[in-house]
Image (cartoon, rainbow, N blue to C red):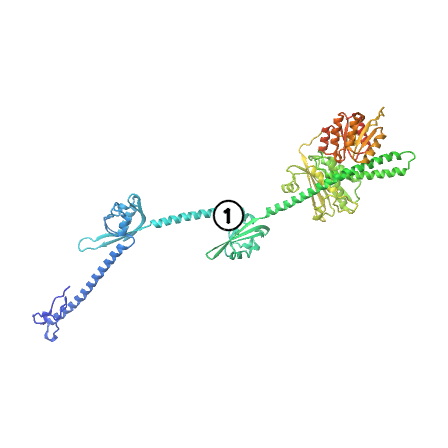
Amino acid sequence: MNLPDLSFLGQNGTPQAPDAARPGQVTVERRSADRFEGPISEVIEQLQTAQRELQVQNKELLYSQQVAESASERFEALFASVPLALMVLDEHDMVVQANAMAHRSFQPTEADRPLTSLMPFVSDTDADRVHRAFAIARVQGRSDSSEVVFRIGRERQITGDLHIAYAEIPLAQGEPLRQFLCAVIDQGPLLAERKTLQQRNEQLHASEERLEAVINSALDAIICIDEHQRITVFNPTAAALFQCPTRDALGSPLARFFPELDRAPAYAQLTTQAALGEVQARTAAGQPLAVEVNMAFEHHEGRVTTTVFARDLTAHKRAEARRSELEGQLRESQKMQAVGTMAGGIAHDFNNILHAILGNVELAKADAEAPAADARVLESLHEIEKAARRARDLVRQILAFSRNEAPERRAVQLPELMHETERLLHVTLPPGVTLLVEAPERLPAILADATQVEQALLNLCTNAVQALGTQAGQVRMRARRVQPQQRLAERLTLTPGLYVALDVIDDGPGMDAATRARIFEPFYTTKPVGQGTGLGLPVVHGVMRTHGGAVDVQSAPGQGSCFTLYFPAVEQEVQRQADTRQQALPGMPAAQAPATPARKRHVMYVDDDQALVFLVQRLLARRGYEVSGFTDPQAATAALAQDPDGYDLLVTDYNMPGHSGVQLLRAARQIRGDLPVALASGYITADIEQAALQEGARALIHKPNDVQELCETVDRLIDGRQ
């Protein structure tokens, strides 16, 4: 702006050119104040002051103009270069101005819709929301609308946040100019990242749920602890194992359940896993618990999380104990089988010796009964006979112990056998010992060999009486109906079912564990030398084994002993059973010697023992028989082949070296089919009996036998009586 030239006022109305006047400035030559007086001087001063103010205002306006132009340039540069889609819209949704980013976003190709209006790009679902945003901005000056979908062409779209600012620009004339500054922030990458994060979170959540399911269903106890040794995870298996609810265990120190693991977390500095093996833990109630422990260590953010895996060893230890017990029973069974085999072999030879002794005693007695015989000879022979019978009973015990096959059993009532045993023991009881029998009337019957059961009861009661010694005491026999529990049945190898239990109880000194472990060993005895054979309890064990039952022992030093026999019960007692097998057993009715025929009956006797052959020859010769004895089965076969009709009976031993009585029986029947044949043995099993009867044997003779019984069997077979 140019200021007016007022120099003429100083020259009395004559204008003068200014010296070196600058453009746009007026130089006023200063005159002395005294040249003008009055009102003119004041006007001049006012004009000069107004001129100076106008100069200052001119400078300010010029600076403002420069600043405005600079701000406009900066705005235009910012508007064009900002990495956001910016648009200026009028109140009719017309795009007044848009930066390059907006054009690239809304019109990526020339074929796309031009960016002349914003609302055509807004999706139908978001149109109402965007209209409301503009209305709010008009009132409040600004508004936002998030995740607005802008459709670009047919297939492409932008999801972004719309930010709106409202401005009114006043004009020199008319209403102000109303415009909206809109910024669209593309949220596509953020939404994609958000979706990815959501998927990862879902996967993480699913993984956590799977991990929690695995932990909760694990068969091992899983316990997690923090860096302060406090429990943070306690799965249901751990709660059941340590008998502590999870809510009570959380926050507890690990030492509450694992006193020995106080130093275990130190392993975290050395390894990520540690197998500690068997560790002694304890339940919430303080009960000891054997567990196998493994540990895992996780490092994250300077902290260590320890996971303890504990496996209960109770069942494993119980199984090991059971296996050890079964191995002991197997070794015991194998040992008893070996000893039984040995006993059977000894008994075979011993039977022959006893048979010869008893036979010679019978002959000597007959000789001693003559009128001129010395009575002392008869007395001595009676003593020899008693000793031999005791030896025979010992052999029978050995055979009963060594017998593995099932005995011939019938339905019997156990109380009857108990009372019979009481009757046998009553006369031999010491004065201070009382024998009590507790036998209920209604008990199931048992399938048993009565003789063997009586022998077992007699052995147990005799041991109980001998355990009391000279002190006063009591021995009880008690029968009861039981159904063994599973653990007892497994320990004694009993099949499930009903049993009749028979207890033999004494209040003697009892036994320690070492003695209990050996009481069923053959020939083991705690009695002084000469007072026990060591076969009483092994015979009991063998009897119970062959009867499908078991024997259990409960004893402790100073608390007496209790032997319990478990017999399988018969649900319905068999009232009467017919014996389908017929054998020549002791006790048959005596028969008179046959009248001496015109020709002596000829008996062939075959045995590998020469003494026994000699005895039988003498015995049968006295009864009027002709006897041919052989110790060689081959020689006997040859003799029979030479004269088949010269013999009326063949009696042969069952077991002979290199040959069996069944083989000789077959050969004899081939030579002469109607010749009666009898087999003799000291150990007759069901298999031996069946094989002999199938081959055609007429009778089985048990050795050692009384002379009268042997002679009666020979008489019966020769006379043709079955």
Residue at (85, 39) in percent of width and height? 383
Could one spot residue 629 in this view of the protein? yes
Q: Position of residue 159 (x, y in %)?
A: 32, 48
Residue 627 percent coordinates (x, y): 82, 30
**Horizontal arrangement in the rendering, residue 480 relative to residue 232 (left or right):** right
The quadrant in which the C terminus is found is top right
Amino acid type, label 1: Ile
Hey, which quadrant is residue 552 in on the image? top right
User: Split into 4 quadrants, where in the image is the N terminus?
Assistant: bottom left
Q: How dense is the environment of label 1, judged by Cα within 10 Å: few (below 14), some, or many (20 and up)?
A: some
For the residue pair 550 and 152, the one nearer the viewer reads as 152
Instruction: Tell me where residue 710 appears, x and y as whole percent.
Output: 80, 31
Query: Which residue is the extreme one toward the right?
Result: 372
Judging depth in this view, the residue of 687 and 112 nearest the camera is 687
Q: What secondary structure is marked by label 1?
A: helix
Lateral position of residue 97 relative to residue 553, left or right:
left
Q: How many marks?
A: 1
80 horizontally vs 273: left or right: left
Say above or below: 68 vs 385: below
Quarter assignment of residue 127: top left
The residue identified by callout 1 is 215
Q: From this view, report whether residue 629 is shown above or below residue 116.
A: above
Residue at 75 percent across and 29 percent down: it is 665
700 sits to left or right of 97: right
454 shown above or below 1: above
Q: Is residue 243 visible?
A: no
Question: Residue 349 lies in what quarter of the image?
Answer: top right
Provide residue 559's location: percent of width, then percent of height. Answer: 71, 47
